[in-house]
Amino acid sequence: MKIRISFNDQSMTATLEDNPSARDFASMLPLEELTIDNYANNEKISYLPRKLTEEGSGPFGNEHPGDVCYYAPWGNLAFFYAGYHWSQGLIRLGRIDGSFDPLLVRGEFPLGIEPVS
C-alpha cells in the first residue's frame, strides 16, 4: 500500500511493508489531526491516536534515511532523515519513495497521512 504524508505545504509518498503493524496503521487512515516535530537529530516524530499491534515485530536490518517506523513504547511514528540503528521496540512500517527532503525542514507542523489510490 502507498500512503501520502503531507505537512508544511509539501508531500511525500511511502510504500508500506507487509507486516501486522503496517496493516494496523493502514486501517487507521486517513489521519488528519496529527502533529509532526523534530526529535533528536535524525528523525521527525508524530504520536498516533492509539497504539499499533506489535505482532511479528523484531530486529531488522538495512536501516537507512527515508524509513517510516513505529516506536511501540511511546506509540509514535518515526520518520528518519539521517542514519539510525534498530533498537528494541522499533518496527519498520515502510519507506519513503524518492526524496525525503521535506523532513529536513526544522519545526512543528500539522500532519496528514492518507492512502494513495
Image (spheres, helix red, strand yellow):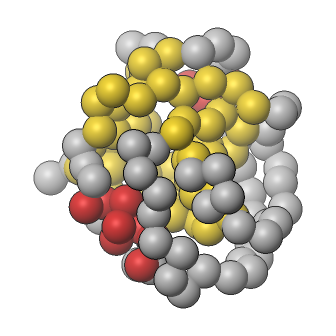
Q: As displayed, is residue 24 above or below residue 114?
A: below
Q: Is residue 110 visible?
A: yes
Location of residue 34 in the rendering, given as x and y in whole percent from the top left corner:
41, 29
Rendered-image quadrant of the N terminus: bottom left
- Residue in the image at 65% along x and 34% along y: 44
Q: Nearer the viewer, residue 116 or 51?
A: 51
Is any atom of residue 16 visible in this view?
no
At which x and y percent is residue 81? 71, 40
Q: Residue at x 42, y 67 (%)?
A: 22
Compared with 73, 56 (above or below) is below
When asked about the image quadrant of residue 71, the answer is: bottom right
63 with respect to 2 (left or right): right
Residue at 34% x, 70% y: name it: 23
- Left or right of 101: which side holds 84? right
Q: Compared to 43, does 16 lie above or below? A: below
39 or 4: nearer the viewer: 39
Which one is in front, 23 or 17? 23
> In the visual, does 98 lie left or right of 13?
right
Count the numbered circles shown.
Answer: 0
Residue 20 locus on image (x, y percent): 42, 78
Residue 69 position within the rendered picture, expressed as x and y whole percent measured from the top left: 59, 57
